[in-house]
Image (cartoon, rainbow, N blue to C red):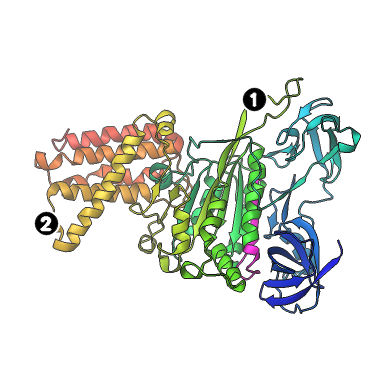
Amino acid sequence: MSRSGRITRIAGPVVGATGLASARLNDVVLVGHLRLVGEVIRLAGELATIQVYEETSGLRVGEPVWNTSRPLVATLGPGLLGRVYDGLQRPLPVLAGLSGHFIERGLEAPALPAEVHWPFTPSVTIGDWVEPGQVLGTVPESATITHRILVPPGVSGRVVAIESGDFTVEETVAVVEPADNGHAGQAKLTLCHQWPVRRPRPVLERLVPREPLLTGTRIIDTLFPVARGGAAIIPGGFGTGKTVTEQSLARWADADVVVYVGCGERGNEMTEVLEEFPRLEDPRTGAPLMERTVLIANTSNMPVAAREASIYMGMTIAEYYRDMGYDVLLLADSTSRWGEALREISGRLEEMPGEEGYPAYLAARLAEFYERASRVRCPVPQNEGTDGKVDSPDRSGSITIVGAVSPPGGDFSEPMTQNSMRVAGAFWALDYDLSRRRHFPAINWTRSYSLYNLKSWYAREVAADWNELAGRAMALLQREVELLEIVQLVGPDALAESERAELAAARMLREDFLQQSAADEIDRYCPVEKAYWMLVVILTFYALMQKAPAGGVALERITGLAVVDEIARLKEVPPEQMAAHAQALLERIRTAFAGLGIS
């Protein structure tokens, strides 16, 4: 790499340079004497427009620019889990050790620990034919995740050398010889490889999402599920619980690997994440949660241009673990800050603005991002034949994206929310009024929805009547909204006794089922089996309560029954005891109603 250009213009994070004759779009360049990392985003004649990912203050016209002649890449290999990176995959703890708490510009550090020796166990032998994405061998990356070393995209051939033992990420572990290329075409494979972050990794086959990603949050799993390999968004104003909801998903969702991207969030919120995650225990294994988590931190006081890079960096890391056959949960908090970065860069480029100043290509960028959510079929772990062909795949992996959106003033009609809604399959609308009433999670059930058809999975795996119960619960909640509008217009005395019973049942559903405490040891995670029995109990009580007007029983007598308090305490019942406890409670409910002459 040699000096190949000079700065001619500086406008915040956007820099113009000439003399980069060999530059291509998306090439990474080093700008100025500080060698600030940037990316070529426009070429017009001799002028190259560069988006700089670091603070450009102090940069001067005439300083040199070097072209690396390669795009922004992610380094993929063992050592990713448990690390905290910035948007360019520089490990922040390492940078802090080099410069202190205030990171100096132009610092570089290897993405993966170069000094660590990883025990490598081959999955193929000399003479085997391997294809891209196939498992070359394994490394125990953590107590919970086995890192599968993959044949990089674009490499295929016959294994002519492979070793087992302890290796660093830069040492050769295998040699692959392409067909008819001889010694000159041999590919030396290490434990890591690089991949451009803006290019989706190739897949063998994309599969239709058929099952939900269970989150342990009742309102999501019951009413608005997201498919494993699908995408969801969480829009909400300040204080409605976006970050708490995403942290809860990171801990409790049924995913093997979690990639958390803090994109433009406030420093204090990101600090809480960085301090809390290392202390959290993985509920599935008892190991620290960080052993299956990658954190990418790009706070609001960091250079605005790096926000876009952090989103793509997180996605590429997620795709890498997906290709190993793992289920990955990618949490982006918040995509609105990414949109603000696009708007600022677009303004610096003097592009024609779209709605509310966002660039006209905002919808396309969001679609490109959310469409990388996927459930895919992976190549077989090892070659089982000798005919040189890849055998039938027998494993799959997925990426489920959950993106937080921060609409100004909670206005869901703004461009980021609307364009995200068009491409995401699940919409969890956070409501300021619910959060003010201390109803958490503050997901508004009248505005939220899920487009994923997962009814067959729930009927097969949970209960045959699950979908009927969920439908009845949703209908009751919608009926409550209609009745409350009547109450506001003409008062509660205008309601019939049966309508008052509907309001009472809906209130039980809201307070005893939808509300869930993230701080309670038992209630913070609710398996779908427990949620099923809670629904059965509440809706059975409601069905019996509907018979009260015909039997001449006052509603106050029913709501005063002792079993009402027992229903409210169902949240406190451990999941393994729920079925027996619920069945006993159902008997007590029927007995209590029988005492009122209702059966």
| Residue found 72% across the figure and 27% down from its top | 382
Q: Identify residue for label 1.
A: 392
| Residue found 73% across the figure and 25% down from its top | 383
Q: Earlier in the sequence, mark 1 or mark 2?
A: 1
Amino acid carrying mark 2 in the image: Ala
Most extreme residue toward the right is: 183
- From the top left corner, tell me how far across and down residue 428 is, in percent: 42, 52
**Which image quarter is the N terminus in?**
bottom right
> What span is in magenta?
292-307
| Residue 560 in sight here | no
| Residue found 34% across the figure and 40% down from its top | 470
Q: Identify residue for label 2.
A: 494
- From the top left corner, tell me how far across and down residue 68 is, in percent: 80, 60
Mark 2, secondary structure of its residue: helix
- Pick the front one: 428 or 442: 428
Crowdedness near tag 2: few (<14), some (14–19) or many (≥20) residues, C-alpha within 10 Å = few
Placement of 261 over or under 536, stated as above or below: below
- From the top left corner, tell me how far across and down residue 48 is, in percent: 72, 68
Q: CA distance from mark 1 to mark 2?
A: 66 Å
